[in-house]
Amino acid sequence: MRVTLGRIRALTRRAAFGPGAGVGFALFAIVLVLILVDLWVDVQMIAWTRRFYDALEQLDAHTAMRELGVFGMLVTGSAAIFLVSDYLRKRLWLRWRQKLTGDALDAWTGGRAYWHLRPGLSAETVDNPDQRVSEDCDRYVELLLELTLDLVGRIAGVVTYVAILWTLSDFVLHFTALGFDIEIPRYMVWLAFLYVLVSSAITHMVGWPLKSLYFSHERREADFRHTLVQLRDNATEIAQAGGEAAERRRLDARFQGIRHNWLRLIRRELILGLFTRPYYQTVLRVPLFFALPAYFAGSVTFGGLMQLSSTFSRVTTTLSWFIFKYRDLAELAAVAHRLDDLFRVTGDPEPVGGVAAAVDRGTSADDALHVRGLRLATPQGRWLAPVPDRTIRRGERIWISGASGQGKTTLLTALSGLWRYGEGRIETPEAPIFVLPQRPYLCPDGLAAAACYPSGPDDFDPARLRAVLERVGLSHRLGALEADSEVALEGLSLGERQRLALARVLLHRPGWLVLDEATSALDATSEANLLAILRRDLPTAAILCVAHREPVGLDHTGVWTIGEVPQTERKTA
């Protein structure tokens, strides 16, 4: 319980505090005031109950008709208060969700946690982060506001209704038990507390497993959804491999996990419902039965009986907040657990325990790239081929060669600042290193956005963008340039994707460029032409090119061979 409350307190601080927090707290305060005003209206409704039923008992038609008018005004006022309160609460929900979602996005994208927390790279991972950022942030704020505001209203209601019940139940219950005469003054008050206390204890004993079941349900649903997304994103490769049956087995296995957990969840809800459902149906009727002894003893009139019953019902209903909201409380605890995991793990991703993350990094003082004593390793502790010491300066074009599996791609990942497993030192220039992988990422916002990534289309002149696309051989795609959806990118071959990525380079004109098999899908002539364009357009840039074959057209000025001492160094030795 203490851990759960700590999680809720930390998440609420993230959602409620920060820039613009005053507006949020003002909205919260206004909603609370409206809840208290609505409570005052409800108190007037209790008084109305006695007047109306006394008028019925006395056959006083004039008073009864007048009270019907009062009833209409009370209902109208209550409805208006509810609608305004609900609107302001939703505005507050939007503000707090925006703040919590922003913090979650910062945690997931800041420090490149989304990369470091991939399976195999970190001792701890976050399952389905997309669900945690999108759905869990939404649901947490919704449940937090609903439960908090309701609880405050219930607390104020308890004080008010108990005071009224105390005033109304100014009579004594007499009965004999085991030969003793027993008198209980104001027994309706004590009975209300006892009735709810026993019911709450039973509810908690029966329903406590729901928290873990809700947690598991959300995770399994997200796993199933993620598998469907994988099928969509890799549709071509799966279809070419004839992998439909294998994918169906994966999906069936995921759904079986949902099914088994769902059966456990609904069984537990059934067990809980065996108690709570009868409680819901009787909580408004039982008070009348409890008040009958006072009525038959002549202690209250018929109107007083209905007023007493109404007040007792409000006391028990208010005190039954824990029972009525148990499922929501269990879900809030599960959602808080998931979000707390996201913030905790992304705060400082812990490396896999196979090898220490000991690559020393720094910024060079001479705007060059220096690699000294570098040897990289896998997260599990397998050492890769040693990397020869090297200094690379602006204007050099280096072909990085070596046999497969020697760690060429891993070296580029380390140069870009991502890979941290191994030993040695890397000093990089202050200017960012622009990296093009073999299969480039295309953001799903249209052809123009994909070409300008990570900048936006507004950062470049449209005429220049069209000219660059024509230079890299994508003139046949210019008709889709104005489209701003993923449809414009459908059907792009890997070669066209690589041409689009090279267009990014020509638009951004980086001072440091890394090509990791970035032209592997192009024919030799096209590759040579495009590399020659890069060489001419970026004469002062340092270009590092990983390729299995000599990058004709790049006119490289040096070779950096991974896994053996370069030929130039052998001659020097």
Image (cartoon, helix red, strand yellow):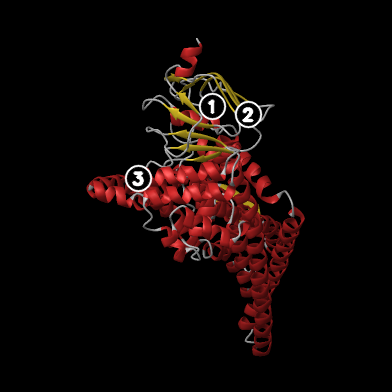
Instruction: Please give the residue where the numbered disc 1 appears in the rendered image.
Output: 420
The x, y position of residue 241, in whole percent, is 24, 46
Instruction: Please give the residue where the numbered disc 2 appears in the rendered image.
Output: 368
Q: Nearer the viewer, mark 1 or mark 2?
A: 2
The x, y position of residue 318, in whole percent, is 61, 58
Q: Residue at x 32, y 49 (%)?
A: 255
* Element type at mark 3: loop
Disc 1 marks a residue whose amino acid type is: Arg
Q: Which mark is residue 108?
A: none
Above/below status of 140 relative to 284: above
Which residue is nearer to you in this view: 444 or 468?
Answer: 468
> Is residue 123 something one can see in this rendering?
no
* Element type at mark 1: loop
Which residue is nearer to you in this view: 542 or 52?
Answer: 542
Above/below status of 534 relative to 76: above
Determine the residue located farthest toward the top in the rendered image.
Answer: 573
Cα distance between the residues tagged 1 and 2? 20 Å
